[in-house]
Image: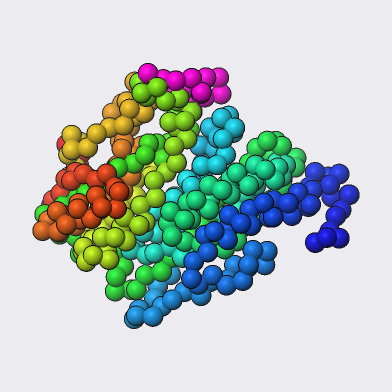
Amino acid sequence: MKNSHSESYAAAGVDVTAGYESVERIRPMVESTYIPGVMGTLGGFGGLFAPDVSGMKRPVLVSGTDGVGTKLRLAQLMDKHDTIGIDCVAMCVNDIICGGASPLFFLDYIACGKNNPARIAEIVSGITEGCRQAGCALVGGETAEHPGMMPEEDYDVAGFSVGIVDEEKIIDGKALAEGDTLIGLASTGVHSNGFSLVRKVFDVEHADLKAPVAELGGQSLGDALLTPTRIYVKAVQALLKDGVDIHAISHITGGGFYENVPRMMTEGLTARIQLDSFPRLPIFDLIEEKGGIPRRDMYNTFNMGIGLIMAVPAGQADQAMALLDQAGEQAYVIGSVVAGEAGVELV
């Protein structure tokens, strides 16, 4: 690549040498995520990974893909780019773990109006942190300049992850039973969903995002909204490792409780959730009050303080709660599985 330079391409808005600089800046961060199974180094045409399938009867690959959505606009307005990569990883690996699969590797895609190597390095620092939290490797990615299609300061971030699980250990809801206990794992805030509504409520283009807000305990609105999505992979793995029989898992993303919880239910069963069993985070009270948003819409858009819900046998609920506490998770018994066709009831 020492001889790679095109003045004509640069004049059209794409500086290939900036791309090479970005790669060198992120190389140490990327390599910090490597786990057993990673083959080769950064810079190849494809990321290589050799999974350890010893002890598995029928290994199944599970994949998930997502982006950060319009939360990126907050990062751009705040000029803070080192956490949204965590969000990107979280939205993928939290979905994978719902099926009982352990994430193996992650790849990212960053599109930008102009390649700013320092900014790309900030973004990737969050991606690598997310990978470390999830215990997976960043084995590749792509940075693409889109001059004429995106403003120079604009960018978008997306990615995908691949995990593995033995077929007989897939969590698919088939074991759900009436009387199962529902455990909710606390979220860190809005996570990465509902930001089109959030941006409208607070008129973020004209708001003072860095001013302290009394309702948020003195934290600024921008910092509260940029709090990265919590990654639940290691918490779920701790339960599975200790023999907790998790019957179903739901990642509470866009669509809130009303859309996501029924996805973990099977025919004839409903999740009955007690709304007074867990605290609502101040950011959601502020959104509801400032936007005049009906309570049902809040629970149909946001996670409201619960980022992941698991159904476990009632007799294993205490064991699960103890393990989650040891894993550093704030967890709550939020309800139970009952007979019914609604999918979810909030009471």
Q: Quadrant of residue 227?
A: top left
Queried whether the magenta region covers residue 259, the answer comes back as: no
> Which residue is at 56% across, 48% downward?
125
162 is higher (above) or lower (below) than 309: below
> Which residue is at 21% across, 63% downward?
244
> Which residue is at 23% across, 55% downward?
323
Query: x%, y% of residue 290?
Result: 38, 20
* The N terminus - image quarter: bottom right
Say left or right for 46 vs 244. Answer: right
Query: x%, y% of residue 104?
Result: 46, 65
Say left or right for 227 vs 49. Answer: left
43 is higher (above) or lower (below) than 205: below
In this rendering, does residue 73 appear at all?
no
In-front residue for pair 49/261: 49
In-front residue for pair 329/49: 329
Say left or right for 297 vs 197. Answer: left
Query: x%, y% of residue 239?
Result: 26, 60
58 is higher (above) or lower (below) than 180: below
In this rendering, does residue 13 appear at all?
yes
Q: Which residues are magenta?
A: 200-214
* The C terminus - image quarter: top left
